[in-house]
Image (tube, rainbow, N blue to C red):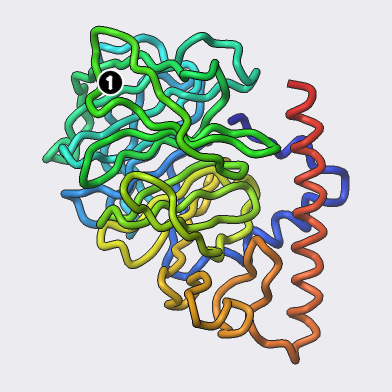
Amino acid sequence: MRSLSYVVAPGAAALVLLAAGTAVADDGFTIKDRRITESSGLAASRIHPGIYWTHNDSDDGAYIYAVDSRTGETVATLTMRGVGAPRDVEGISIGADGNVYVGDIGDNLDGSWSHVWIYRFPEPKKLADATVDATQFTVKYADGARNAEALMVHPKTGRVYIASKNEDGGGLYEGPAQLSARGTNVFRRIDDVPWVTDGAFSPDGEELTLRSYFSARAYAWKGGRLGADRRVRAPLMGQAESVTYTADGSALMFGSEGAGSSVAKVDVDGKGQGGDEPGGKSPSESGGGSPGADGGDDGDSGSGGKVTLGLVVLGGAFVVFAGLKRLLRRS
């Protein structure tokens, strides 16, 4: 998805920047590479601690970047060989086979392309600039073409899933048990999901988190289907585009687009900034953490300044949401 800063109404930009700035956790990081201006996906490396793979949205070529979360610097740039020119790369995930999967699945005209692509290559054992041989898979949806920004590979079964993006709700699509490079891979709708800009499975494969511009929910994953869900305190960002679990599954990393974009760490299972747990306190009751996308404050109800900040955040979010709706309708 292209940068949407231009849809913000005059006078609202400062509110959005304020909201984004307060949401970034201390142990997150900022992407410093000037080439990465539209980070649309994140995937935690399986073999390089602290490394996150990301990519630009479109008009960048077949490039994948390895970013060190300790410094925010790019430590490797991979060029995929054996694929066509990417159109709209929106998601990235690492599978049970140790391969990196890249989703060229965006379609801003919501059904203008008869097919989309997934690219796959082994995660390199050495972090260095390199050209990697990638396999290209052709993908179609059983119920017709659509826009999507979330690609998730289950860490145990290796099955690939795509969540379509729609303002009024999308669908969760399941790929075949094995992707084929020779024919068309048909993805079939298995459930309804909210407006999704990215998603990720937990490393143990027991949970799927889906995020949108202003919120996130984690779903129990039972028998290859969505189970009970809970709210996750997603940070409010200028253009919230990506999410992944840390390699150990203890936290979620939320990313955004834009030059010098931030990645925020949010603890899971009620730790720090985590979401609701059955029988436990909600984020607004337990205190701590940053303002969430669903309007929760930081737990200090006696602070007038923090209440005011919450109102500012909500006001900025409303303005951005209205702008996004106008943009989507024009598309």
Foreground: 5 or 249? Answer: 249
Instruction: Residue 79 in the image: state x and y as whole percent.
Output: 28, 23
Identity, as a three-letter code, of the amino acid under mark 1: Met
Write down the residue under mark 1: 80
Secondary structure under tag 1 reads strand
Above or below, 170 relative to 228: above
Identify the residue shown where x is 64% and y is 84%: 299
How dense is the environment of label 1, judged by Cα within 10 Å: few (below 14), some, or many (20 and up)?
many
Q: Position of residue 226 (x, y in %)?
A: 43, 49
Q: Residue furthest bottom?
A: 302
**58 and 193: which is toward the camera:** 193
Question: Based on the displayed image, in which of its 4 quarters is residue 285 positioned?
Answer: bottom right
Q: Quadrant of the C terminus?
A: top right
In the foreground, 242 or 190: 190
> Is residue 191 something that shows in the picture?
yes
Give coordinates of residue 228: x percent, y percent. Answer: 47, 60
Tell me, yes or no, if residue 36 can be seen here.
no
Given residues 325 and 217, the one toward you in this image is: 217
Quadrant containing the N terminus is top right
Residue at the location (44% across, 33% down)? Answer: 162
290 to the left or right of 5: left
